[in-house]
Image: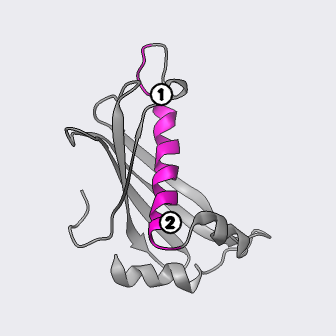
Amino acid sequence: MPETDRFIAETTFYVRYAETDAMGVIHHASYIVYFEEGRSHYARQRGSDYASFERSGYYLIVAEVSARYIKPARYGQQIAIRCWIAELKSRTATFEYEIVDAASRETLVTGFSKHICITHDGRVSTLPQEWRAWEKAL
């Protein structure tokens, strides 16, 4: 759970059939895709969508990802993805996530991903100033 003074972006949607296994439970790999949507929504909420980030000459590569599965979600269930920045350094950003049942707010999955900023030619780079400024408002 994040500190209460951090900026947290939240987006809600229904679990789609294609994201589930034969039992109607979300496949474990789908949560990593949900993390990505959480990051994208976070950036949009902060005023800098990831598509613009890429157009400006950068990528954020995944250096590490982790998920802790607490309770399964199922097809048709409405879930919310909460995302925030846990750590921001000159060249890296670590996002944390909490996926909850949208109605009960029961935690289903928690996790994090660590990213390194690179240029389009593959060189490690500092994050753009616009993104580094988020550190002041974590």
The dot on residue 40 is none
Indicate the position of residue 101 as horizontal and vertical percent values.
Answer: 28, 38
Please give the name of the residue rendered at 54% of the width and 63% of the height, measured from the top-left corner: 115
Q: Which mark is residue 44?
A: 2
Above or below residue 124? Residue 61 is above
Q: Is residue 45 left or right of residue 108?
A: right
Secondary-structure class at tag 1: loop
Q: Quadrant of the C terminus?
A: bottom left
Predominant SS of the magenta segment:
helix
Residue 52 x %, y %: 65, 70
Residue plotted at (39% across, 67% down): 85
Residue 18: quarter of image:
top right
Q: Residues within 10 Å of mark 1 (few under 14, many from 20)?
A: some
Q: Which residue is mark 1?
A: 27
Relative to residue 2, is residue 21 drawn left or right? right
Q: Is residue 1 above or below residue 91?
A: above
* Quarter of image, res 7: bottom left
Dot 2 amino acid type: Arg
Quarter assignment of residue 38: bottom left
Q: Residue at x 47, y 78 (%)?
A: 89
Front position in the image: 8 or 110: 8
Label 1 amino acid? Answer: His
The x, y position of residue 54, in whole percent, is 69, 68
> Which region is colored magenta?
23-47
